[in-house]
Amino acid sequence: APPCQHAMDVGIIMDRSGSVGSKDFLKSKNFVSALARKFQISSLGTRVGIIAYHSSSHLVVKFAQEDKQNPSAMKDVIDRIAYTGGGTRTDIALQMANSGLYSAAGGDRADKPNVLVVITDGKTNSGSKPYSSVLAPLISKKVKMIAVGVGSGIDYSELREIANGNTANVLHVDKFEDLFVRLNSVLQASCQS
């Protein structure tokens, strides 16, 4: 059995499109800063990678960037992420997570559980690739999907799709404790072998 892990590779995808709005994007940023603090991220412990997206996707920080893997450096990174508005291409952001985070180049650690937290209101633009096709490579890498709703018009059916059909992994940005509980259960599962 794999050794019990007390650390994870946690990817975070942040929707900064027009439908989320600047005020709610600030909530998302606070949520991600709280996560970095609560899990006391470090290069040897839990690492965080972040993608921010609207109609295009931007890799903000990779797991591999060890100098950023502490709560204060990560807070500086998060504070600098700008709200853009614009369209929503969640599929492009998920593809970037697969190639840019959960990969050798991204610094994915083979022995650590993988979690991807997608903070969005759903509502990816028409013309986006279906979730089933962009999630498949992530799921084959055993990435646990968590969808976090933000904004005034959340499409929960779409969030359920992002969470790979698991309603327990669909949360709300105002309920940080729920995320803490879900992530802790991922760690415990890696310890119950």
Image: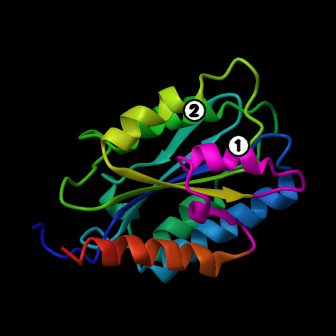
Q: Is residue 112 left or right of residue 32?
A: left
Query: Which percent across, then down, holds residue 188?
Result: 33, 78
Name the element at disc 2: helix
Amino acid carrying mark 1 in the image: Glu
Tell me the residue that label 1 is attached to.
Answer: 158
Residue lying at 33% horizontally and 66% vertically, measured from the top left: 8
- Whichever of callouts 2 and 1 sits on the residue coming sooner in the sequence is 2
Q: Residue at x 70, y 17 (%)?
A: 127
* Residue drawn at the location 28% of the way across and 68% of the way down: 43
Give the residues drawn in magenta, as a range.
150-174
Check the image and name the residue furthest to the right.
152
In the image, residue 153 lies at what x, y percent?
88, 51
| Badge 2 vs badge 1, beta-carbon distance below 8 Å | yes
Secondary structure of the residue carrying tag 1 is: helix
Q: Is residue 69 magenta?
A: no
Foreground of the two, 188 or 82:
188
Exactly how many numbered labels are in the figure? 2
Residue where numbered disc 2 is placed: 131
- Asked whether the viewer can see residue 37, the reply is yes
Q: Residue at x 52, y 79 (%)?
A: 181
Amino acid residing under circle 2? Tyr
Would residue 6 be found to the left or right of residue 155 on screen? left
Crowdedness near tag 1: few (<14), some (14–19) or many (≥20) residues, C-alpha within 10 Å: many
